């Protein structure tokens, strides 16, 4: 279409604020063929929900079934690294279809139930308090580096049963793994550094858990190896996935949600009035309004008609949860940040068989952070005239979020 920039997904203004572009797509061309990326971009809420419910038509094994080169392009000398990235991603739980996905998810499901995750709330609350104890006397902090990034690493390393002194190493590896959905041409180099470092770190831990299992997440995956559901490479890859997925999404939820409150003082006042009661709904609205994951990708398993367009078998599809969450057909006043919004059927965590395993934990971390900020730092304000986002088509990731308080 003439008014749609076909390469806009990585355009600086769209990275900075994607919602006007998503709204234009949703209104003008909700099932949109993007020529530079060679994929369909789906933005309407009802279409996204329909695709999620009809998972058998849209394979999650994109990296295994799609042999096209990466886009945006990578540095030519780094192109051979893409095969190693493929091998890593292809064994992730999130890249599987049934029946493999069902079997793998069955191994780890009980570990991540809402009830099981609720038992982690005291640890999360204590970790948030400790991080704020360190920042509060200074009167300012970067929410990203001093709260949003270290919190999930503390939680995940405890879940993995690894020593506290290794937190910084794992945080550094997680930062490198985040390049997996970035757009820089050099991105495969830091990504492969993170993959190799993580696999080397986890391998001896898995060896020990095979012979001496505990109650940590690595032991859960090791049990899947003993029963034949996982092989060793899959255990290592999915341990890395926990660090990567839990780190990035929670970090983005905290930063994007905090920024939404800073830009909407009326809603901040609502949260401050009763943080314990308001934090649950507030977190859901943060997830809807500016979700940590903008989009996810699938590949068509058969010819499908959607929105009057024919999607061919083998075509790539990227559905935009961030656009669906602002669809006026599904949400009244969708561009308004309203922490009392009910119902709030956002798709920030997906839905159906691939519903995010870590959603309950991410919610707890968000609730505890927003509650603590409202209770302890009621006069918090933004300390920057401009903010920058990472160039990712999948994640909504701030580069920093400096704040101050009186």
Image (cartoon, grey):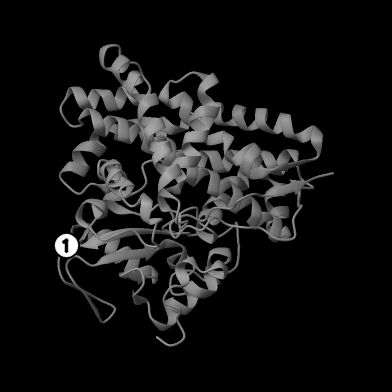
The residue at 58%/57% (across/down) is: 389
Residue 39 location, quadrant:
bottom left
Label 1 element class: loop
- Of residues 137 and 198, the one nearer the viewer is 198
Rendered-image quadrant of the N terminus: bottom left
Q: Is residue 116 left or right of residue 371?
A: left
Front residue of this view, candidates 40 and 42: 40
- Residue 15 appears at what percent x and percent y? 53, 64
Q: Say which of 326 and 64 sits in front.
A: 64
Residue 270 image offset from top left, x and y in percent: 69, 54
- Can see residue 327? no
Image quadrant where residue 200 sits: top left
- Foreground residue, 47 or 333? 47
- Tell me: residue 261, above or below residue 324: above
In this rendering, the answer to whether 20 lies above or below 122 is below
Q: Work out whether 275 lies above or below 201.
A: below
Q: Residue at x 79, y 47 (%)?
A: 379
Q: Residue under circle 1?
A: 301
- Please state the horizontal and vertical placement of residue 43, each as a whole percent of the image: 40, 70
Q: Residue furthest right?
A: 406
Q: Which residue lies most toward the bottom here? A: 2
The C terminus, quarter of image: top right
């Amino acid at each position: 279409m003439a008014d749609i920039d076909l390469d806009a997904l990585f355009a600086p203004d769209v990275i900075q604020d994607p919602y006007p572009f998503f709204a234009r797509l949703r209104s003008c061309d909700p099932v949109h063929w993007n020529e530079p990326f060679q994929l369909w971009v789906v933005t309407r809420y009802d279409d996204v929900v329909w695709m999620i419910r009809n998972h058998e038509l849209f394979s999650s094994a994109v990296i295994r079934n799609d042999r096209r080169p990466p886009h945006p392009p990578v540095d030519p000398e780094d192109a051979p690294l893409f095969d190693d990235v493929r091998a890593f991603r292809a064994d992730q739980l999130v890249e599987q279809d049934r029946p493999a996905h069902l079997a793998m998810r069955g191994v780890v499901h009980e570990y991540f139930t809402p009830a099981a995750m609720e038992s982690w709330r005291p640890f999360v609350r204590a970790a948030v308090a400790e991080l704020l104890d360190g920042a509060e006397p200074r009167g300012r902090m970067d929410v990203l580096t001093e709260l949003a990034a270290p919190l999930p690493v503390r939680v995940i390393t405890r879940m993995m049963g690894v020593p506290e002194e290794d937190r910084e190493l794992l945080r550094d590896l997680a930062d490198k793994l985040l390049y997996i959905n970035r757009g820089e041409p050099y991105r495969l180099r830091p990504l492969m550094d993170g993959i190799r470092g993580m696999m080397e770190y986890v391998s001896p831990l898995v060896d020990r858990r095979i012979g001496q299992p505990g109650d940590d997440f690595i032991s859960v995956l090791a049990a899947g190896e003993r029963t034949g559901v996982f092989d060793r490479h899959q255990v290592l890859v999915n341990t890395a996935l926990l660090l990567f997925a839990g780190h990035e999404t929670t970090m983005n939820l905290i930063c994007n949600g905090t920024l939404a409150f800073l830009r909407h003082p009326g809603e901040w006042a609502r949260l401050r009035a009763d943080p314990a009661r308001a934090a649950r709904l507030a977190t859901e609205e943060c997830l809807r309004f500016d979700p940590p994951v903008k989009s996810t990708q699938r590949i068509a398993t058969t010819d499908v008609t959607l929105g009057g367009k024919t999607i061919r078998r083998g075509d790539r599809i990227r559905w935009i949860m961030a656009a669906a969450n602002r669809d006026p057909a599904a949400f009244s006043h969708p561009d308004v940040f309203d922490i009392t919004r009910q119902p709030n059927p956002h798709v920030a965590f997906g839905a159906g068989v691939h519903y995010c395993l870590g959603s309950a934990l991410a919610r707890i971390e968000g609730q505890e952070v927003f509650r603590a900020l409202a209770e302890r730092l009621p006069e918090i304000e933004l300390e920057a005239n401009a903010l920058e986002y990472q160039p990712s088509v999948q994640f909504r990731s701030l580069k920093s979020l400096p704040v101050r308080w009186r």
